[in-house]
Image (cartoon, grey):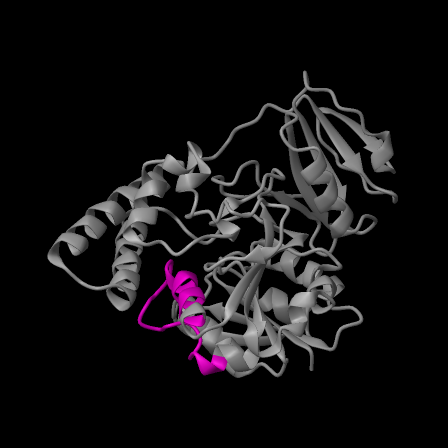
Amino acid sequence: MQLSVIILNYNVRYFLEQCLFSVQRALEGIDGEIIVIDNASSDDSCDMVKAKFPQVKLIENTANLGFPKGNNRGVAKAKGDYICILNPDTVVAEDTFVKILNSQLSTLNSQLGIIGCKLIDGSGNFLPECKRGVPTPWVALTKMFGLYKISNYFGRYYAQHLTENETGKVPILVGAFMWMPRKLYLEVGGFDEDCFMYSDDIDLSYTVVKLGKSNYYFHETSVIHYKGESTVRDGTYRKRFQQAMQFFYKKHFKKSWFFDGMMYVGSFVFSLLKKHEQKQTVRTIDEYVVFSKGDFQFNVSQKTVYYSSFNQFKSEPSKNREIIFDTTTFSFAEIITFMEQNKNQNLSFKNYIVSSNYVIGSNHSTDKGQIIML
């Protein structure tokens, strides 16, 4: 078997359904499997998987075991030569997996570490955290104080030696999409289960680098990551985030009272900033634009126009418009390309998922997603 896609789910039933829909398409022509691990969701995620995706291997945990332990349980059941750790709040293009399998990176063999790809948010904007440097104390401070915005000299946190459209080596990749040889994952012991969440991807990336392998950012495919759908940035979030940062630094860096104090203050400030980032953007929609080659009807009171081709679309910056994509007649690859090409034009984007008759998306990387049942 070539590839095992590992998806850890927690209370994001509708995002999971969309994700599985996209992964199914991307695995066509590949000898692969999908493994979903559910961390004791209180919604009907498991019932949905059983009913709509019976070929998916489903592991139902009776408690929320955290990100590392949940993924480790999934990989233990995997059979693929490669694994792809994938968040449930993502959408992959139909050619995402094929492009990586056919890339020169797949020929690196014993030197290959982890591969990450270009991530965009629900509004089509590039997510810089998909390629990062090792967050040493100095690098962490340049991030917390925004120095990376001033000059690439301070740009190690977001690996700014590479642009978003360049493939190359980077030390740290994000857990929303991590592709690697299964035997390497098992060799390093997978995600460290002493870390409940938040620094687990940094730790795994850095552990692989310390083993002498090379991690790569691969720019030739884009994946939507809606971000934070199963995370509420409350007091528990701040506590776990601080614990995660302390875990990483204590594990990999020399300890001292000054360093520990600086990291405690830094992680506290950083977690507060993250908390205040989360918001719900309210948009007044002047017009809906529906792309469909079929008979899909989006019944809303506002003006709605229907196009069967992306070539029919014309930019109108004076209008706030929401784009609805019929995913039964347009590929996810086409949708992702359109989003990237038309971002920042007073547009928001939603996907229509026919299997449960809803539209889904988010307006900003810091937004909770929106689900509209039809």
**Residue found at x 27% / y 68%:** 251
Position of 264 compared to 211: left or right? left
Which x, y percent locates residue 13? 56, 58
Q: Nearer the viewer, residue 371 or 105?
A: 105
Q: Residue at x 59, y 23 (%)?
A: 284
Q: Which residues are magenta?
A: 186-208
Q: Is residue 206 magenta?
A: yes
Left or right, residue 61 beside residue 196: right
| Depicted 15 relative to depicted 326: above or below | below
Q: Is residue 216 visible?
A: yes
Instruction: Please determine whether, in this image, residue 62 is positioned above or below residue 146.
Output: below
Residue 55 seen in the figure = no
Going by the picture, which residue comes out furthest to the top? 318
Q: Nearer the viewer, residue 371 or 124?
A: 124
Q: Residue at left 42%, top 79%?
A: 189
Image quarter of the C terminus: top right
Q: Where's residue 197, x and y in %?
A: 37, 62
Residue 49: x and y, percent? 62, 68
Quadrant of the frame with the N terminus: bottom right
Looking at the image, which residue is at 25% across and 46% down? 266
